[in-house]
Image (tube, grey):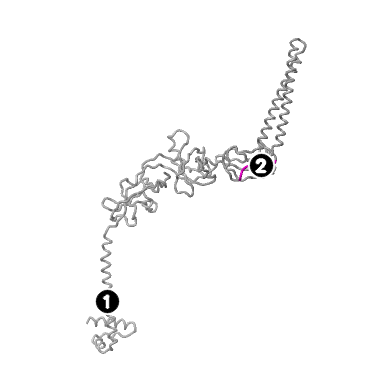
Amino acid sequence: MALTERVLQNEKRHAERYGRSMDQISNRSELEKSLGSSPPQRRWKFLSTGAALVALALSYFAFSRYKDDHAAPRQAGALPVTVSEPLRRDVDSRFGFLGQFSAIDRVELRAQVGGVLTEIHFKDGQIVHKGDLLFVIDPRPYEIKLAQANAQLHSAVARLALANNQLERSQSLRRDDFATQETVDQRTNEQHASQAAVEDARARIRDAQLDLEYCRVTAPFTGRIGARQVSIGDLIAGSRAAVSPTTLLATLVSLDPLYLDFDMSESDYLAFSRERAPIAGPLADTIAFGLSDETNFKRHGTLDFLDNALDRSSGTIHARATVPNPDLFLAPGQFARLRVAVAAPTPALLLPDSALVLDQSQHLVMTVSPDATVVPKVVQPGDLRGGLRVIRSGLEPNDRVVIDGLVRARPGTKVVPQHGAIHYDAIADGQD
């Protein structure tokens, strides 16, 4: 009879689909009669359809039971997470800036005497040392000028000798009353004028010697010279007092040490000043810096200059550090990231940056209580130290913080805490 009921329901669906009258199949006896009198193919169709429906229902029921049996333990069980206490370490308070290198000494090499350029003793971009010969201007006109000055000196010395003799004779005659006092005074004045002529001749000699020295242009300090702006045979315009246009020969910049210039904002300057107020004496703070392609801060310099006023247009104050460059690897114009310490080292708590969760405008960390319950805490993060984030407030040293498996640590849920370790990267912090 159960089979008859299933066949009856199946016939009703077929009747609704093809518009058959429900009255034709409402009588159970007629249905049974039709089944008994229908061909074997029709009876087999009805039996197979019913069997398929029964098998599908049993399969769905078994799958639902299997799913419920296996899903229930997963929802009820606690999930594992990795926890650790915050790393405690003494760190100093410091600010980061972007700086640019500049040469301590930079000079434009210009001739102080005019003439024809006869020699060039360097290659463009070469490292030159203090006193190295760079350019030579034709010295012959200045050698002639020096010879003339020497001749003038000899003439002045001869006149001085004559004036001394005449003065001595006049004074002798005056003592015997054979000469007047006027004659003695005249000889005295001539002797003084001859002495002045000698001094003038000697000054002219020094002037001629100086011009002759300026025919040889040498490096005033050690550094890298730029591209030459003249060629051999050019007529050079020179002036020692720069009262007229002079010819630019080349530029020279020093390389060791270098300046590292940067600007502090007003807030950074205030924090820096408050920390340095108790410290007497000039600036002598060590700074750490790294180049644009370096991830650490292994290079060091000394902060030795802070300007005396803030720029009114930008609200910043200019500062400068001096950095060594013995291998001449650094060049003026390069950029670098630097750190300036503004306070002495104090104990701090550090966590991996991945342990912090940003919740709108707040930063949270997930802690695990003694009963293995996840408890969120609001913290105030600081800057990065050794690849870790400094936690300024909101965390206790004995808190167990979730450092791995945050997706499984939902507030209020139970977890299985597993101990982990937090590692400080001294290289990333600029320490060897």
CA distance separating discs 1 and 2: 107 Å
Viewer-nearest residue: 231 or 382: 231
> Where's residue 356, x and y in %?
37, 51
Res. 36 in view: yes
- Residue type beneath disc 2: Glu
Q: Residue at x 32, y 45 (%)?
A: 397
Q: Secondary structure at mark 1?
A: helix
Hey, which residue is sitting farthest right in the picture? Answer: 178
Q: Tell me where the magenta segment starts and ends, as one range.
A: 116-123
Which numbered disc, 1 or 2, marks the residue that appears first in the sequence? Answer: 1
Residue bearing mark 1: 55
Q: Is residue 122 magenta?
A: yes
Give percent across and percent down for residue 143: 70, 34
Q: Is residue 35 above or below residue 287?
A: below
Residue at numbered disc 2? 119
Identify the image quadrant of residue 215.
Answer: top right
Locate the N terminus and report the quarter of the image it occupies: bottom left
Q: For this view, does 212 lie left or right of residue 24? A: right
Q: Residues within 10 Å of mark 2 (few under 14, many from 20)?
A: some
30, above or below 205, in the image: below
Q: Position of residue 217 (x, y in %)?
A: 64, 38
- Where residue 408 appears, x then y in whole percent? 32, 57
Marker count (numbered): 2
Give the camera-side residue of 365 and 110. Answer: 110
Above or below residue 64? Residue 381 is above
Residue 369 vs residue 120: left or right?
left
Q: Quadrant of the C terminus?
A: top left
